[in-house]
Amino acid sequence: MKEQPPMGMNRTGIQMSPIDSKEMQGMPPPDMMQPTPGDESGMMEMRGEYILASDPVGSVPIPGTVRGALTTGASMLTGDMPQLLIDKLGERLAFERTGTRLYDALINKFQTLQDGTTSMTLADLQRIREDEARHFHMVRSAIESIGGDPTSQTPCADVTGVESMGLMQVITDPRTTMAQSLHAILVAEMTDNAGWEMLIALAEEQGQDTMVTEFSVALDEERAHLQMVRGWLEEATLGKVVSSGAIVDDVSDATQSQQLH
Ligand SMILES: [Fe+2]
Ligand SMILES: [Fe+2]
């Protein structure tokens, strides 16, 4: 079943005021034919000055534990950049935490609306929510394993927190529908998939084999999330699934089948 947006008294378009719009589109007097003076160069110049004068968005904390100091020092000697790994681990930690909260908000909306536009079930959403929470704890342990402090906010964690604000606003807005909320979740899941892929490549580069193994499982789960969310959004919008691959109605099944490949 498709989700239809309501028709109503939307006054944002020019067609709502035919008399005024006709007058507005009429030939302007000669003195108004001149283009408006000025352009965006002044604004760009000012932004440029701020860019050059600004400090970066935070920093990666110096490891507070002996093991961390040793690990970081050893990696630096071998030419790796452990601070980059810690920064990106911090990013995933922040994003998985937000992901858990996004699904909490989506579950709340789903239960309230009793939405029947998709084949999505409460159990599906709860399973994905648990995956996100588990991923959060997995990344926290990974940070601790190299002596990092998972309670610190790294620069990329900070940036991703700002990025996610819009997604959270869409889902917690009481007026948004399930389809609109699913669109916000789709943005999150696509970003999540790309983020895990990059983190695995980085961990591989730095010889963190345990992280690579664990994170690959998380990536498989994220791929299943993306496929499901995309399918549900298509169901709500088109009344059918058009993306490649059928909707998987069991996250654990999807994860297991992907792990076999
Ligand atoms: Fe996630
Ligand atoms: Fe996810």
Image: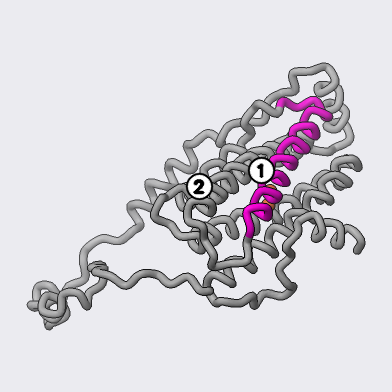
Image coordinates of residue 65 in percent, x first then y, are 79, 18
Residue 182 figure quarter? bottom right
Residue hosting label 1: 96
Amino acid bearing label 1: Glu
**Residue span colored magenta:** 121-149
Q: Please tell me whether residue 71 belongs to the stretch shown in magenta.
A: no
Q: Is label 2 in a helix, a strand or a loop?
A: helix
Give the camera-side residue of 88 and 221: 221
What is the distance, in whole Å, between disc 1 and disc 2 at their CAs?
A: 13 Å
Amino acid bearing label 2: Met
Image coordinates of residue 254 in percent, x first then y, are 80, 60
Q: Measuring 90% from the left and 40% from the top, which residue is drawn there? A: 210
Q: How is the image coloured?
A: one colour
Q: Is label 1 in a helix, a strand or a loop?
A: helix
Residue hosting label 2: 168
Placement of 125 over or under 60, stated as above or below: below
Q: Is mark 1 within 8 Å of ligand 1?
A: yes
Q: Is residue 152 left or right of residue 180?
A: right
Q: Is residue 149 visible?
A: yes
Quadrant of the image for the C terminus?
bottom right
Q: Please tell me whether residue 137 belongs to the stretch shown in magenta.
A: yes
